[in-house]
Image (cartoon, grey):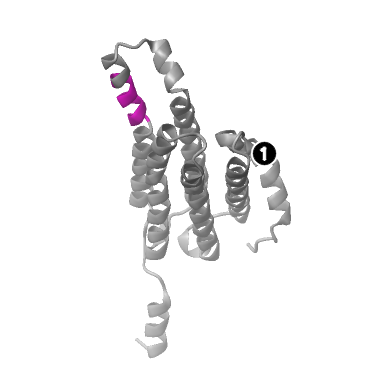
Amino acid sequence: MTRAGVQERGRAPVLYSAERPKAFIDAVVAIAMTLLILPLMESVSDAADAEGTALDWLGDHRWQLTSFVLSFAIIAMFWLNHQRLFSGVQRVSTTLLWISMAWLLSIVWLPVATALSGRMPDDDALTKAIYIGSMILTALVATIQRVYVLRHRREFGEISTDTLRGGLSADISMCILFSVALVVSITIPAVNYNALFVMLLMGPMQALVRRLLPPLED
């Protein structure tokens, strides 16, 4: 083998089948979503020990219930976006695997942030920063992941530029909207976690970001 061939081989990333990483990622996300319910399960036991009624429990834990549903929906949104990206990924590199591990770390952390937000006072700015900041972190890592796949898409499989463009606009939109929600929730305490309803603007924001993104080469 020529020296040029050795150098070329040295520059080429080692690629692995994406099947096992996909299954692993799905399993970890499923576990994270399941963990969201644990604080509520514990609160049910506490209410039963205190001989409270179901109505008392619903009233005392209404924010915990809300944060559970909200976090479940947000993790589901992150997972769906991830699925759309990896649907065309057939091979992965070591770098992509590590970026995926960072993304999973942020997902697994979210149940902890959710439990924290459900137990701490509503006006605790640090709790808001941890809870909503965790979502910003996940969106940022997802953006990094998609940009990396975009730069190496021919190595990883048959991934259409239209899919990557749409996904990238979604990732950037989530970063923007979660950041807006964090700023609003902290600067206007009365709004509290209701600032997360800004995510209802996801559709229009994604359409705007997509128009502003430069065209991607096939």
- 9 is higher (above) or lower (below) than 213: below
Residue type at numbered disc 1: Leu
| Residue at the spot 60% in from the left edge and 37% down from the top edge | 195
| Mark 1, other Cα within 10 Å: few <14 / some 14–19 / many ≥20 | few
Locate residue 68, reporting x and y percent.
Answer: 44, 30
Q: Nearer the viewer, residue 214 or 217?
A: 214
| Residue at the spot 63% in from the left edge and 40% down from the top edge | 188
Locate residue 115, reporting x and y percent.
Answer: 39, 36
Can the viewer see residue 87 in this picture? no
Please state if 128 lies on the left or on the right of 164 as rendered. left
Locate residue 45, reporting x and y percent.
Answer: 28, 20
Mark 1 sits on what residue?
Answer: 201
Decide whether the magenta segment is chiefly helix, strand or loop: helix
Locate residue 171, reporting x and y percent.
Answer: 57, 50
In this view, which residue lies farthest toward the bottom? 3
Rendered image quadrant of residue 93:
bottom left
- 139 is higher (above) or lower (below) than 189: below
- 1 is higher (above) or lower (below) than 192: below
Q: Which of 139 and 218 is in front in this view?
A: 139
| Residue at the spot 61% in from the left edge and 33% down from the top edge | 190
Quadrant the C terminus occupies: bottom right
| Residue at the spot 46% in from the left edge and 34% down from the top edge | 121
The residue segment tinted magenta is 37-45
Say whether residue 119 is magenta: no
Can the viewer see residue 28 in this picture? yes
Disc 1 is placed on an element classified as helix
